[in-house]
Image (cartoon, rainbow, N blue to C red):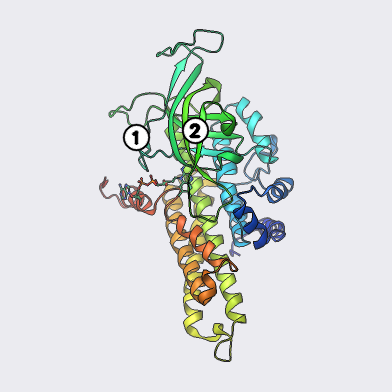
Amino acid sequence: MSGTETEEQRMIRQAVRDIASDYDWDYWKSHIENKEFPEEYWSALAEDGWLGVTIPEEYGGAGMGMLEMSIIIEELSRSGGQGGIIFVLTPVFGGISIERHGTEEQKEEYLPAIASGDLRFCMGLTEAGAGINTLNIDTHAERVSGPGGDSERAGGHEGDEFVIDGQKTWISGVENADEMLLVARTSEFDRSNPTHGVSLFLVPEPAEQDAITLTPLDVELPWFETQYQVDIDGLRVHEDRILGTEDGGLYLLWDTLNTERIAGAASAVGGGLRAIDLAVEYAGDREVFGQPIGAHQAIQHPLADAYARLMCAREMTYTASRKWDEGEDAGMESNVAKLVSSEAATRAADRAIQTHGGNGFTSDYEVFDIWQNMRLTQTAPVPNEMVRNYIAEHTLGLPRSY
Ligand SMILES: Cc1cc2nc3c(=O)[nH]c(=O)nc-3n(C[C@H](O)[C@H](O)[C@H](O)COP(=O)(O)OP(=O)(O)OC[C@H]3O[C@@H](n4cnc5c(N)ncnc54)[C@H](O)[C@@H]3O)c2cc1C
């Protein structure tokens, strides 16, 4: 627990820990093996109001901030399972984006349903041809006139519908999503105004759309969700489903990405602490030379080291959360939190495997799965190289290197 936590924050921590304790490793293992959404877990979080933690009370949420969201994500990850992942897709990409940038109609339509657990999101950004260079995306949306009117592509700005074509990849959880936040070009790339020309669309029932074809990817990760290649061919979307402004989607996306980084950092801190908890428990039980292996300094010190790094990463995550809650630019803190937490968590999981000896590589124990998930946080949603690029350029003032 952090020294500066309020009584309310301590209660939140305990409340979500109590919920998560009902869902053990066997529960998660079976959901991962069967690629099944954890419905009971999701409903329990919704019933107690945690999915709407940052959603304003007038839309059915708890009206709290990113700090409380971070505490929840950390505790869910520390309790095992994939609560952190659940939060990034729906409460962050759905909830925070719409809270901050939606129209009044969009807020009324989506936010209460997110808070009640009735609406789940996925996020369609990455493209094979663009990679981490979002400006290079090729999926494009063209205005046409609406149904009943001329279905020819208008090519100008007179229509009230868009037709979207393109291909996304790595898109997680489309099979469980009621909405996809889809990133597409609405104007050609213009070197003199590079951040202009991208829009965000709210696409309903993405897995049910005739114009969308899903091809599952073969990903070696212990996740209950699948990643897909998403082919989009002639998808019609009304202009009232644009989030934010037409052509101005990148600003909105970048605003939301800081919260994604904070949420990812909180999830990594919780996962790393879970690895340490399991290692400490194992080290206390396992006897080899007539005493528990945890009595040896060679086992203790690397765990103590990993714990210390996680504590620093956690404080940075909370600092970023507080800054975001105060409406300040939290870019530097969010990036630093993401960087240090992903590396601290991977290291903690690595030491937990070492503590478990050969058992660390079996599916009877959780630590190898934790390592895979923590290692992922160095690469996705944004690779640490790009985080370092951000810090070097925007905080240290060094020239842009790419
Ligand atoms: C399990 C999983 C789930 C995902 N879920 C989603 C999702 O739901 N929605 C979605 O839109 N995307 C999703 N992604 C995609 C993820 O965000 C991307 O994989 C990630 O952003 C990296 O893009 P890339 O794989 O194309 O790597 P690339 O862009 O090809 O980069 C490859 C490597 O080169 C490095 N590199 C590239 N340019 C530079 C540079 N200028 N300086 C230094 N290094 C550089 C990168 O850091 C990286 O290490 C998911 C990915 C995974 C693995």
Indicate the position of residue 249 as horizontal and vertical percent values: 45, 31
Locate residue 29 relative to residue 193 in the image: left or right: right
Q: Which of 228/99 is in front?
A: 228
* Residue at point 37%, 42% (across, down): 131
> Which quarter shows the N terminus?
bottom right
> Which quarter shows the C terminus?
top left
Residue 17 occupies quadrant: bottom right
User: Would you name the residue on which mark 1 appears?
Assistant: 136
Indicate the position of residue 120 as horizontal and vertical percent values: 62, 39
Local SS, label 1: helix
* Residue at point 55%, 87% (across, down): 288
Q: Which of 56/15 is in front?
A: 15
Measure the C-alpha gap from mark 1 to mark 2. 15 Å
Q: Name the residue type under label 2.
A: Leu
User: Would you name the residue on which mark 2 appears?
Assistant: 182
Q: Is residue 61 above or below residue 26?
A: above
List the single residue furthest toward the bottom: 290
* Marks 1 & 2, CB-CB < 8 Å contact: no
The mark that comes first in sequence, 1 or 2, is 1
Q: Which of 52/100 is in front?
A: 52
* Residue at point 57%, 47% (across, down): 225
Instruction: Say whether residue 243 is visible.
Output: no
